[in-house]
Amino acid sequence: KAGVTQTPRYLIKTRGQQVTLSCSPISGHRSVSWYQQTPGQGLQFLFEYFSETQRNKGNFPGRFSGRQFSNSRSEMNVSTLELGDSALYLCASSPRAAGTNSPLHFGNGTRLTVT
Amino acid sequence: TQLLEQSPQFLSIQEGENLTVYCNSSSVFSSLQWYRQEPGEGPVLLVTVVTGGEVKKLKRLTFQFGDARKDSSLHITAAQPGDTGLYLCAGARGTASKLTFGTGTRLQVTL
């Protein structure tokens, strides 16, 4: 069974630009969550999508947005990039959206560098 | 605000030694998960604990969830170089798809 696939693996952008990251979940998984990982803040929740609907959102500005398609693939977009957006962006899929025992399966992330 | 504090932040030990990593919070979680992350990869789930006081063993790793479901610990017996990595605890409240991650413990095990 293929794991969670994130593309691209590495990305270099300039301040003010916008970027789109892609995530393909494990087949059959309907929930996709996005996290930002930085050395200073650790892993922080961005948002979660289930059946094309955003169910939860973290404390990030509106420049961060996402969507999920009918095949459960998800994209996240960051507009007007700032230097502080440099981070590893991790996508995680889960078979279920609700329930305390739903495991998260992470991809290997997209390393975004903003210059 | 970091809801889950892990200690220690860094740990460098020799092969064969034992260690314990702590994950503490002032908040109650419905479940707690432990992940290990290696360089260049995403976190990989090790275990989920749900019941207060629960103890789970995974080979040389022992996980415990506090009675009040506010804290957890991970104990590794006879550490091996393959245990090297970033250990993360993550608490769930309500839906496990929205996790609050701990500050992380970076473990290095040398020969």
Image (cartoon, coloured by chain):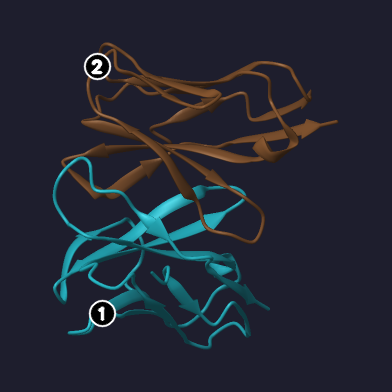
Amino acid type shown at disc 2: Gly
Give left or right: position of A66 versus A6.
left
Give left or right: position of A98 versus A45.
left
Residue A60 seen by the camera = yes
Residue occupied by mark 2: B52
Q: Nearer the viewer, residue A64 or A43?
A: A43
Residue occupied by mark 1: A67
Q: Chain of mark 1?
A: A
For label 2, the SS is loop
Kindly indicate which chain is depicted in cyan in the rendered structure. A
Amino acid type shown at disc 1: Arg
Q: Chain of mark 2?
A: B
Q: Residue at x 41, y 69 (%)?
A: A4
For label 1, the SS is strand
> Any mark on residue B70, and which?
none
Q: Residue at x 62, y 18 (%)?
A: B77
Question: Which residue is the extreme one toward the bottom?
Answer: A17
Q: Residues within 10 Å of mark 1 (few under 14, many from 20)?
A: some
* Residue A11 occupies quadrant: bottom right
